[in-house]
Image (cartoon, coloured by chain):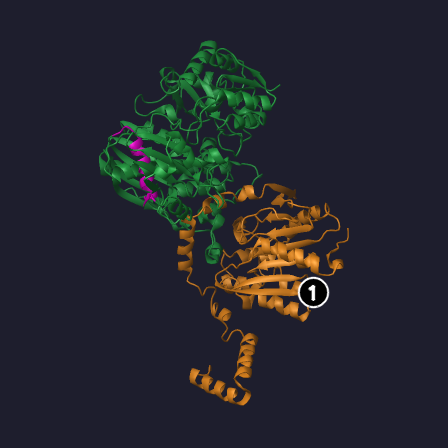
Amino acid sequence: MLVLGVGGFMHDYNCCLIDSDTGRVAMAEAERLSRRKHHAIKPDDDLMVPIRKVCDDLGVNPRKIAVIAFGHTDPFACKDWFRREFTKAKIVEIDHHLCHAAGAFFASDIDDALVVSVDGFGDGSSGLIAHGKGNRLEELVRLDDVNSIGLEYLRATFHIGLGGYGAEGKTQGLAPYGEPALFDAYMKEISVDSSGRVWLSDRLRSPTSALSAEGGYMNTQLLTNAFLDDLFPRRILPEPLTGEHKNLAATVQKVLERVVGDMVAAGQRLTRADRLVLSGGVSMNSSLNGRLLKSGAFKEIFTLPMSSDRGIGLGAALHFLHVSEGMPRFFNLKHVFFGAANDDKAALKAMQRSGLKIERPSDPVAFAAEALSQSKILGWVQGRSELGARALGHRSILADPRKAEMKDIINARVKHREWFRPFAPVSPAELAAGYFDYPEGVADLGFMTFTVDAKEEAALRAPATVHVDRTSRLQTLVKERDPDLHRLALLFGDITGVPVLLNTSFNDKDEPIVETAEEAVRTFLGSDMDVLIIGSVVGTKA
Amino acid sequence: MTPSLASRIRGFRQRALEKGLSETLRRALLARLANPGEGLPFSRINPTGLFASDVSALHEEERKRIRASSFLMDASQVESTYPHHIESNGRILRFAYLPAREKPRGLVVLFHGHDAFLHMGPLAPWREFDVLAPWDTFGYKRQGSWFWGEKGQAFVEALVQDLIQRHLAKMPGLPWFVTGASMGGFGALWHGLKFGANGVYIQCPQIDLARKIVDFGSDEPTNPYRHLRGGDGAMLPDLLALAKSQADLPPLFLIQNQYDHINPFAEHAWKLLEIYNSKSAWYGLRIHPSIGHGGDGSQAEAEMFFACLIDKSPARRFKRES
């Protein structure tokens, strides 16, 4: 049976096709194909684009799809299109947070876990506490969307002037530069009850003035509230970032960690589980995840790499198969390389067309290690692209982490983004513990979903990957999952004595991660990278 | 004392017998128009306070709409919608500038509603007009200053005019027009009337801000209108006085819902149209038979209106001194 999970009708449109007879899974995100970051569906969009891609991946005809599982129960207009287009398919609608929870739990290899999903809002909820056991998912507590801690974090992000949806990571990055001076004041407006439900005060829940509400619209009112507006005026770019902005970032980060920490603790009391599965957009916050990892409260923690709405298609399909159909579990997410495959021919063509100087080294990995050791900044495109917001070494920009100023160089000249944004280290799993401090065997650090403490060794020898608070969003590399990048980090270590690379997503400001060779060349030309390596083809600016 | 329904029916019957049914109906309608507090639908919506609609129901509808739309993304993109900025005296005015898809026939200044709400749809390039859209981040909690100012100081007006004049200087001889809805309707009228725009297309505009202060609760610290005026006796932009003082009023097209609980027709647009009537100025009015603060106006229709003004009216009206 072919089951298509579809989600992200509000943003991050995505789908997942599962052949339940063979256990094969294909996934696609529309933004990689449309080049519109977060791909909010527009009326004239071709909704089939990602669906054709997953059908091609599994080699099946879209007409053979037996079930379409929507990852939202709200009445989105695009659902009518699916009903018209797939007349023979059975249509099922699954609650948004159940999809988040199912996507993470059923993709993990954990059999019995506390499952916590937290996001801004979806289908009227902002969170869920559940108990996952085998192929069952028992909902215990649901958080309504008026009392949304995820939305509160977004409001603070908007108030600091860092952007709207999708910019929350900037707040996380800015937080260590400030002091959580407003923490006590903020926490007077928030409580978490013994069941794990979050309650926001009226000052957090209500808009600043009644004007928008009386007008029957909300618009940016959705992104602010009376509490924030009473602190200081909302920052409008290009006004400078000041200490109060940094302090608000630090505060809301600490608030998030406290609130979700309390939720998780309540969930643990309810389930008595010693393993934790995290999902929902809030669990993209690696500092929060790192705090939970460091707490030592769980024997094992798993968070879905595409835990925002990007993973809703996967969750809808898995929820239907396991919970609705009672099918035994079969899927375990070992990697996220479900995107477009790399192609040397396309790389050659794209580089030739753009006038790049082309080389074909016999060992491109060794070539890359040598270039990195000479402080060259590399565009690195290998294999199938990774799903999710983070580049995990298949569509990455790589650099030498030994000089602290590399962070500023890449922020300003390559990524064209804010000065305070940190960069993540990648390091072979067998060597990473020499540089970073984390509990062994509790979490898979291969997905860059946890921030861990950097050791003195990292701060001294790989400072460009260590944030101002001495933490790093580490990605460990294992040979089986990613042989090329694993070898590259080892070779770089052999040359320099530091087996750590700086890794950031291969994209420019406000654009999705590159998918194809053409896109990689275009972004390479528009930034200050030195070398582009696609498969075995090397290009440099002539 | 209000006459009873029975006596009103008896009176109506008597007049119908004397004047005929059609004449009696016509007179009754005129009487209602002359005294809208009595019985017209639009006068019933704001009998004693600000609201007549069920605001809770509006909120619930809105919540459903937000859940089932890309609303969050739209709101999130407000900053990128207005990518440029000018600076004056340390104040920043962000704006969007969208060149026409074809050769421009003029400039349109598009004024958004309160808190950046775009009642007439997202910004997109027009076919024959360059579009300039300032983002009003001033006023109470930076939610809007009616494109005028704060606490009696009209500095936003000056910023917006600076922006407009910079762009007009680049297109000598071409006309300029203004459009907007709600707070943006006020902004369009204020700038259009005061600085000589060649045409105005507005929807559900606020006209009488003094009235809004009273409606909203004059002493409330959260009153955005009061923030506009500042302390007692400070200046408030008086659009009606401005309209009365103008020798020449620009052609105007106005759209209003039959029931608008925010800017009731009788208390806002009506007053402006009275002045247009008194000066025999050109206007078109469409009352849309629906409820709420909005209307069926669109940017596409605004473009048609402005193109019509250029094509069908005396050319001299649309020449600017270069």
Image quadrant in which you'd find residue B153: bottom right
Whether residue A25 sits left or right of residue B235 in the image: it is left
Rendered location of residue A406, percent (x, y)? 53, 21
Q: Which chain is green?
A: A
Rendered location of residue B239, percent (x, y)? 63, 62
Q: Which chain is orange?
A: B
Residue at left offset 62%, top offset 64%: B284
Chain under disc 1: B
Count of numbered labels shown in the rendering: 1
Q: Quadrant of the N terminus of chain A?
A: top left
* Badge 1 element: helix
Q: Give whichever of A42, B75 is nearer the camera.
A: A42
Q: How many C-alpha atoms fall within 10 Å of the one at disc 1: few (<14), some, or many (≥20)?
A: few
Whether residue A74 sits left or right of residue B82 in the image: it is left
- Judging by the rendered image, the residue that carries numbered circle 1 is B245
Whether residue A155 sits left or right of residue B282 in the image: it is left
Q: Amino acid at mark 1?
A: Ser
Q: Give whichever of A369, B230 is nearer the camera.
A: A369
Rendered location of residue B50, percent (x, y)? 48, 64
Q: Quadrant of the C terminus of chain A?
A: top right
Q: Is residue B151 above or below residue A458?
A: below
Residue at left offset 64%, top offset 53%: B154
Whether residue A422 is visible, yes or no, is yes
Whether residue B93 is visible, yes or no, is no
Q: Is residue A420 one of those drawn in magenta?
A: no
Residue at left offset 29%, top offset 33%: A20
Q: Which residues are magenta?
A: A88-110
Rendered location of residue A362, percent (x, y)? 49, 10
Q: Is residue B273 above or below residue A184?
A: below
Q: Is residue A96 one of those drawn in magenta?
A: yes
